[in-house]
Amino acid sequence: MLPASIIAAKRDHRELSPEEIAFFIQGYASGHIPDYQMSALAMAIYLNGMSTQEIACLTSEMLASGTVLKWPSDGIPRVDKHSTGGLGDKTSLILAPILAECGLQNPMLSGRGLGATGGTLDKLEAIPGFRTNLSLQEMTEQTQSIGCVITGASVELAPADRKLYALRDVTATVPSIPLITGSIMSKKLAESLNALVLDVKFGSGAFMKTLEQATALAESLVRTGERMGVRTVALLTDMNQPLGRMCGNAVEVIESIDVLQGGGPDDVRFLTIELCAELLVMTHRATTIEKARAQCAAIIDSGRAWERYCRMVVAQGGNPHATLTVAPATEITAPHSGWIHSMDTEALGLAIISLGGGRRKMGDPIDHSVGLEMLVGVGDRVEQGQPIVRVFSKDAASVKSVILSSITIGDQVPALPLIVRRIDGASVRAQ
Ligand code: URA
């Protein structure tokens, strides 16, 4: 087999065989196929797409490039959630302890901020001492002893993705549904899960700007998960405004603690419970979605989710009771009266990056103390001079104009529901 003939086949719209995909991905992972040939194939895939069968083969070859987590046969379901990323998305910090309290185990591999969206690892590192670089052994041990762990992807799991993702980043081939599916699902399948829930976001602050694009990605992810033996459900959620009030790192941990202690914004609590409830039903820990929701709400309201979170943070070297440093606050006020019409959520995320709360390039240090608090949401009435955003930074003046231009005040609009669509194995099989 020759790499060039496989690239030519994809260029000419021919479906690749499982052997060709295996040859290419294993060759790339082992260093026998150079970056320039992998780049050419990635671009051919970006331009011409892949069939369901090809995407499944790509995913399983990327998975096979590394090791997978091993669990004892003890009947305990291992589950996880993946979010495609958005501003203010802190559900992981709340969801993992709830799932553990429900008797499930959640070995969560998380990432760092990507583009304008925050990353769970960066948020957790706002907690003094918290370790996000656990070894595979530490990760599996903590999953079994505490029931949940949130850590960075280890180099042993799906190494082909690590290499390919860096290449896609510099060859303009990131936004390709087959390549995103292979990337996300190879990492999740390496956790050896029984069930997976996906939060696929669409809108101004999401990777996928339209509901149609997000639906196509969700269907590809669910189809691939189910084909590879993992029960998978995707919720399509609105990211035309931040989730919750707080956006940043330390401020998001503080808001997560509020939710874990029974308070916090309704949208964060609602979405977290919905994601947990899907996993409880998929693993037969609840017979209906209503019972699953009630179980999760009771776990939060009894204080058990907060206690489990404290155990997880302590196990990873952090102090859950530490007072987190937050930069001084400055309020930005509405320039005129009206209704909050829309938000450029990506621009708000970029404002946080410019304050130092995210990275411009890999390896940049992060200022965990900066962030934004959204004091209004889409559809709210505001009066001239009313505070609409609180900026936590010594340099708030530098983002005032970008924040004001990213929030449109105009005619009244109905707010979109947070969860717009649900896709499961049955819905993709019915197509
Ligand atoms: N997140 C991933 O892990 N991979 C992608 O390709 C895109 C988003």
Image: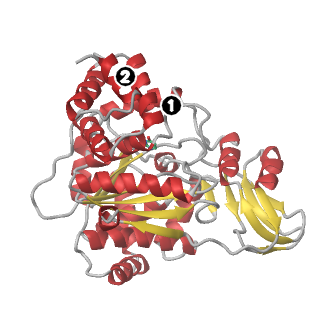
Task: Give the residue at mark 2.
Answer: 8
Q: Residue at x 59, y 66 (%)?
A: 244
Marks 2 and 1 sit apart, C-alpha to C-alpha, by: 22 Å
Q: Is residue 107 above or below residue 353?
A: below
Q: In the image, is 229 to the left or to the right of 73? A: right
Q: Amino acid at mark 2?
A: Ala
Find residue 396 and report its horizontal and vertical position in percent.
78, 48
Q: Amino acid at mark 1?
A: Asp
Say whether residue 83 is visible.
no
Q: Is residue 231 above or below residue 380?
A: above
Task: Give the residue at mark 1.
Answer: 169
Q: Residue at x 50, y 66 (%)?
A: 257
Q: Residue at x 24, y 75 (%)?
A: 285
Find residue 60 and report its horizontal and vertical position in percent.
24, 40
- Identify the secondary structure beneath mark 1: helix
Q: Is residue 297 above or below residue 272?
A: below
Q: Nearer the viewer, residue 9 or 353?
A: 9
Say whether residue 273 is visible.
yes
Tell which quarter ligand 1 is in: top left
Nearest to the eye among marks 2 and 1: give it. 2
Q: In the image, is 121 to the left or to the right of 316? A: right
Q: Quadrant of residue 196?
A: bottom left
Image quadrant containing the N terminus: top left
